[in-house]
Amino acid sequence: MKDFELIYASQLRQKQRESRALVIDIRDRKEYEREHWPGAVSYPYDQLERGTARLPKNRKLILYCDHGGGSMQMARMLGEQGYHVASVVGDIHRNIHRNSL
């Protein structure tokens, strides 16, 4: 049973606007600081896994990492906890550059 939605990296901007979602970069802080999706916040995977991040349940969450594996695992976990969540699949780096121009 899937408790989350999958979206392609190329759809992120549209999905973010449509749902006024909170976009979350789950990579480590150094990767986030080097580059990240415009408007994204940083909650590294291990912080989310420990449950130390305060996430809104009344807002859609869109998670991304480098290629989608980690964000998919975390989206499944958060979906099981009752969050409305999506995971980005595909190469986020190309889309970060495309959307920051």
Image: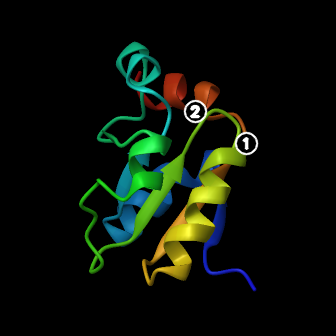
C-alpha distance separating marks 1 and 2:
9 Å
Residue 41: mark in rendering:
none
Residue 51: image quadrant is: bottom left
Please state, as top left, top right, bottom left or bottom right, where the N terminus lies in the image: bottom right
Query: Vertical placement of 68 versus 94: above or below?
Result: below
Q: Residue at x 34, y 35 (%)?
A: 38
Q: Amino acid at mark 1?
A: Gly
Dot 2 alpha-carbon crowd within 10 angstroms: few under 14, some 14 to 19, many 20 or more: some
Q: Quadrant of residue 87?
A: bottom right
Q: Is residue 95 above or below residue 52?
A: above
Q: Residue at x 41, y 64 (%)?
A: 61
Instruction: Please tell me whether mark 2 sits on a helix, a strand or a loop.
Output: helix
Under mark 2, the amino acid is Asn
Instruction: Identify residue for label 1.
Output: 90
Q: Nearer the viewer, mark 1 or mark 2?
A: 1
View extreme (front): residue: 50
Pick whichever, 20 or 49, lies toward us: 49
* Tag 1–tag 2 contact (CB < 8 Å): yes
